[in-house]
Image (spheres, rainbow, N blue to C red):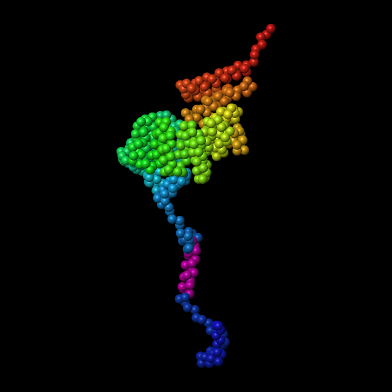
Amino acid sequence: MNRLRIANPLKLIMDRHLTGERPHFRPEKRRINPYRVIILLGLIMGGIWILLGIDRGEVQPLFQPTPTPTRTVNSYVMEGEAQFKAGSLGGAIIAYQQAVKVEPNNSHAWAELSRIQTYSSSLLSTNEERYERLTQARESIEQATAIDPDNAEVQAVRSFVLDWYASNPLVPPEESQSALNDAEAAAIRALQLDNESALALAFLAEILVDQQKWSQAEETIKQAVAIETESMDVQRVYGYVLESLGQYRLAIEKYREAVKLQPNLTFLYIFIGRNFRSLEVHNRALEEFEKAAQINEQLGVQDPVPFVEIAKTYSRDGEFFIAALNAEKAIRINPYNPNTYGQLGIIYTKARNFEGAQLALKCAVRGCSAEENQVAIEILGEGVAVNGLPITSGTVAFYYAQYGSVLAALSRPNQNYCAEALQVLNEVRASYPEDPTFNQIIEENIAICDLVDLRSTPEITPSP
């Protein structure tokens, strides 16, 4: 144990006597080392300088965490591929968008982004949504083409994008034809760069179908399959070619081959289901649509398309109640989609529920405010504003056979909807003046309204 050292008093007296100093019993003071003082002052000044530097941002504090390392373009590309295989097309698009941010001159990443954007358009409900997504895909593939115009993969994907863009009903006829010609030129260019490109051959076959060159399309897709059988794109196009030829069972087989390669792509199940429906094998069609709905649920994807297809299928079987339930479920998923209101209106019409059909079809054709949207109020408990569909080849059925006809059928002398009915029917006639079917339906409904007007006219009693 340490003890305090006490000075010897006798020794102190003797020492002081010898030196002539008066003795005292205080401990002796330590001498100050000037060098030590200089060093300490330097350390203090240095510390003050560092603190001031930190405040000004000129000096970084010690022991801060190291910055997160930047992800490489390959890591994003791999993530995009994994998301696509998992069926999460939205996730794949985000990953490839990050990839091109990291490396803007990567033509492969731009091409893959464009390809997935194009496929994802098939999962959207309206022509407007699909048009917007296909426009984005065009922008992406043009970036890839500007970077590497002599790349066979880029040109092949460009042909695919332009073909799907040309097929959208919102693209004007002249622009559609121009895009289809450019698509064919891009596929041919891809084959000039690589005559063994199965992707280019497959997309060329798809373009030939859209040009109504069915025999050439069949020959071309067979060449693609001979080169590459383990390609989802090739097998999908083979199914499309066979479907266009009315060979629905063979088309289903090829779509199933595509499913084996990419089992989580819901649009493939939708294609299979539609072919079963064309064969009037409705139970098998429903199975495929339900698989698509289940995959979406597993992925957390809110997609109304499978439920719309289920509703259409039940409606064809005359099971209007369950058909309406599925259409209503689609509206719950996306209450802003006018196409779904149109489908629900068709179901109500077939079920002879004309009042319900009129409300749903009005939202589809003319649009409706939140207050007017009685359909959404009944389904969701609140109104939702919906923009109407423009008249196109894909939506004209809502105008002529449904909305105009329903309005005419509901017209009575005391509740006359004929003015609106005739306005809708005249729009159909102006858009399709040479179509005999449309003209016949228009004339029939005009006759109904003439009869209503006649009944509304009060009889004139002759004066005596």
- Residue 391 location (% of width, % of height): 49, 28
Q: Write the residue at 38% across / 43% down.
A: 230
Q: Is residue 136 magenta?
A: no
- Residue 28 location (% of width, % of height): 53, 84
Is residue 159 shown left or right of residue 418? Answer: left
Q: Write the residue at 39% across / 32% down.
A: 209
Q: Write the residue at 54% across / 20% down.
A: 444
Q: Write the residue at 55% across / 36% down.
A: 326
Residue 175 occupies quadrant: top left
Q: How many marks?
A: 0
Magenta-drawn segment? 37-54
Q: Is residue 176 visible?
A: no
Up the image or down, 310 lies above or below 5; here it is above
Q: Main secondary structure of the magenta part?
A: helix
Query: Which residue is situated farthest in the right direction here?
Result: 464
Q: Is residue 249 visible?
A: yes
Up the image or down, 241 lies above or below 78; here it is above
Up the image or down, 425 lies above or below 46; here it is above
Q: Quadrant of the N terminus?
A: bottom right
Q: Is residue 44 magenta?
A: yes
Q: Quadrant of the C terminus?
A: top right
Residue 247 occupies quadrant: top left
Residue 219 occupies quadrant: top left
Is residue 464 shown left or right of residue 409? Answer: right
- Residue 47 location (% of width, % of height): 48, 67
- Residue 85 location (% of width, % of height): 44, 45
Query: Which residue is situated farthest in the top direction here?
Result: 464
